[in-house]
Image (tube, rainbow, N blue to C red):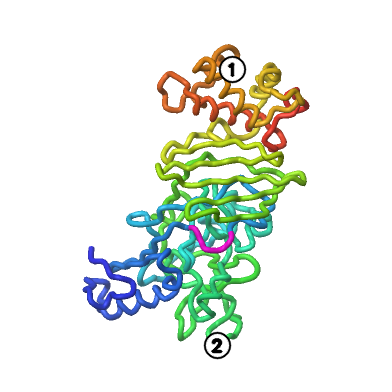
Amino acid sequence: MKKLSALGVSALAVAGVAGLTQSEAAKRSAQIAKSFAPFAPGVKTRADESKFYVESDGMPEHELMSGIVAWQQQVALPQNYAGTNAWSIPLFPKPAVNPLSAKDHFFRGAIAIAANGVPIFNPIKNDGRTDTLIAGELDKFGGHSGRGDDYHYHIAPLHLQAKLGNDLPVAYALDGYAIFGYLCSGGSTPKDLDSFNGHTTKDRGYHYHASKTYPYLNGGFHGEVVEAGGQVDPQPFAQPVRPALPPLRGAKVTTFRRLGEKSWSLGYELNGKTHFVNYSLMSDGNYRFEFVSPDGSKMVETYRPGQRRPGGGPGGGRRGGGGGEERAFFATNHEFFDANHNHEISLHEVDQQIRSVFANTGQLSGAIGRFAASHAASFDFDKSGKIDLQEALDGFRAALHHADLNHDHSLSGAEWKQ
C-alpha cells in the first residue's frame, strides 16, 4: 500500500480511490494535516490512498488532571499511538446509510482525535448514562485518564484554538468529518445543526461543531464507521501497566507537574490533607510510582509493562464490593500489621511488614502465608508455584484495598470489625 506524506503528498502516486486523482488526494491530505501541523513534532501525520493517520504519545502540553473532583485514581501515562497502532480516519468520508447516535452507541473507546494527538471519547461514560463533565470527572481542559492510565478528552478541546484559530478544526471525528469550534467561518453562530451537532456549508462541506451543552462535539457519526464491541473498529489500543483502581471518594486533584522529560507528579487533597503520586518512566522501561502520604511517608511500587495484574488494588487482586473475607483476615492479624498500634492499618504498614517478613525468612509463612496460598490467583501471578516479594506486596495491597470501605488507603478498627 502506497503511503503519502501529509505535507508532501504531491510527489507520490495514489492508486484507485474511486476515480480520485493524485492531486485530489494530495489536496485532501494536506488540508487535514493543517490542524495537526502546529503540534509537531509531538504529533506526526501520514496518509495512504484511503486513510489519514495520526501518531502521538497521547500526552498534551497543557496541565493534566487538575480540577477533577470525581477521581478514579488514575494518572496519565504516555501511549504508543504509532505505526500499526496509530489513529486513522477516512481520507474521503462517506455519509452513512444508517447514521449511528452516540446516545446509544460507542460508549467504549474514542469517537474523535484532537489536533494535538489526544483521543476524544463519548461524553457519556461507559455506563451509558453518566455525563462525565457534569459528574466532575474532567479536568479544566475537559480530559482525564481512563482505567488504562490513558489520557483523553470527553468534550471538544477548544483550548487548541489558541494555536489553530477559528478557521481550522480542533479535531476530526473517526468517520473523517472535521469538528470545529462554536462558530462558522466568518464568525457567525450555526443555527441549523442536526442531532449530531453537524451541518453542511459551501466552504466546509459537512462538519461538526462544538457546543457548550451535550453532545459537546459530534453526537454520533454522520459518516460511515464500523461498530464492534461498543466502539469504532478498528482503533488504537492503550497499553496499561497498572490495574484499574476504584474511585477515591472525596478526593480532588489539585496539582500536576512535569518533573522531567519522563517524570510527573500529581497532587490530590483528601479529608483536608495533601497526597502526591510521583511517577516516572525508567531507563529499563519500567514505571516507578512513589505514593507520598501527608506525613511525608512514602511507598514505592514498580510496574513492568506487559505485567499488568488483574483486579483493582495497586498491584492486582479482586475488585468490587464485598471484602468481608479480607476484613476478617486483617481483623485476626491486626496486631501484626498495625505496627504503630494506632488501630489503623495503612498501605505503608502493609508494605513495611511484608518486606520485613521477606528480609527475615525470604518467604511468607504462618497466617499470612496461608491466606496468600488460599488466594493463589491473586498472589502467584506468574504461576511459578512460589510467591516472591513483589507478588506478596501486590497481593496484600490489593487485599487491603478490597477491604477498605471508605477508600482512604487504610483500614480502621471500625472497618475491620465489620
Q: Residues within 10 Å of mark 2 (few under 14, many from 20)?
A: few
Q: Which of the 4 quarters of the picture holds residue 56? A: bottom left
The answer to the question of whether label 2 and label 1 lie on touching residues, with beta carbons closer than 8 A, is no
Say which of 68 and 349 sits in front: 349
Element carrying mark 1: helix
Name the residue carrying label 1.
368
Magenta stretch, main secondary structure class: loop
Check residue 62 for magenta coloring.
yes
Element carrying mark 2: loop
Q: Which residues are magenta?
A: 59-63
In the image, which disc is placed on residue 65?
Answer: none
Residue that extends furthest to the top in the rendered view of this protein: 366
Task: Indicate whether 257 appears above or below 172.
Answer: above
Name the residue carrying label 2.
186
Task: Indicate whether 271 appears above or below 213.
Answer: above
Quarter placement of the C terminus: top right
Task: Say which amino acid is labelled 2.
Answer: Gly
On the image, the x and y values in percent for residue 193 come to: 57, 76
**Residue at 66% of width from left, 52% of height from top?**
253
